[in-house]
Image (tube, helix red, strand yellow):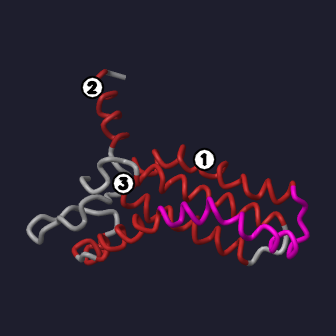
Amino acid sequence: MSLREENEEEKNLKKPFLHAGSWYRMSNNVRQSSLFGSTQAFRDSSISVFLCVFIVALGPIQFGFTAGYTSPTQSAIINDLGLSVSEFSFFGSLSNVGAMVGAIASGQIAEYIGRKGSLMIASIPNIIGWLVISFAKDTSFLYMGRLLEGFGVGIISYTVTSKDLFVS
């Protein structure tokens, strides 16, 4: 393999998987090809900007809800599910484990689909996590929901603190 072929492969690896940047700046004269051709109307509208800003604004709220949720609900969760104090403590700490995994994975997610796309992706595990916790009947669902919440918060934390979120 020659040096030129290796350089071309490195350039291809650094290209984003999906084009997710500057949807609101695309004019009618300049069209960029997309993996999904039917999303052109979505890109031309300002809906994507509002959606992204909405998710960014709710990111700190989600972070606070995840961090502070277990304290006021401790007695209710212990009584409803019959948990011991150690099981509840484990439930409370699982969001940190999920956030570590989410922060590690968020760099790759942001690299492949862009920072705006990764914010939109981060809302999925947060919503699913809260729903799983809301309808949990045993500890396995409770723990799974808490991990999903932490994973989403880890992605949001990395992506929101990036300096060039709205520049790309």
Rendered residue at 37%/55% (across/down): 115
Q: Is residue 137 above or below residue 120?
A: below
Q: Residues within 10 Å of mark 2 (few under 14, many from 20)?
A: few
Q: Residues within 10 Å of mark 3 (few under 14, many from 20)?
A: many
Give the Cα distance between marks 1 and 3. Answer: 19 Å
Question: Which mark is on residue 22?
Answer: none
The residue indicated by pointer 3 is 114
Q: How many marks?
A: 3
Dot 1: element: helix
Q: Are marks 2 and 1 in contact (CB under 8 Å)?
A: no
Of the image marks 1 and 3, the number of the one nearer the N terminus: 1
Magenta-highlighted residues: 60-85
Residue 84 is a magenta residue? yes
Which numbered mark, 2 or 1, is in the foreground of this view? 1
In the figure, is residue 80 to the left or right of 107? Answer: right
The residue indicated by pointer 1 is 101
| Residue 167 picture location, percent across and down | 24, 53
Q: Residues within 10 Å of mark 1 (few under 14, many from 20)?
A: some
Query: Which amino acid type is marked by label 1?
Result: Val
Question: Which mark is on residue 4?
Answer: 2
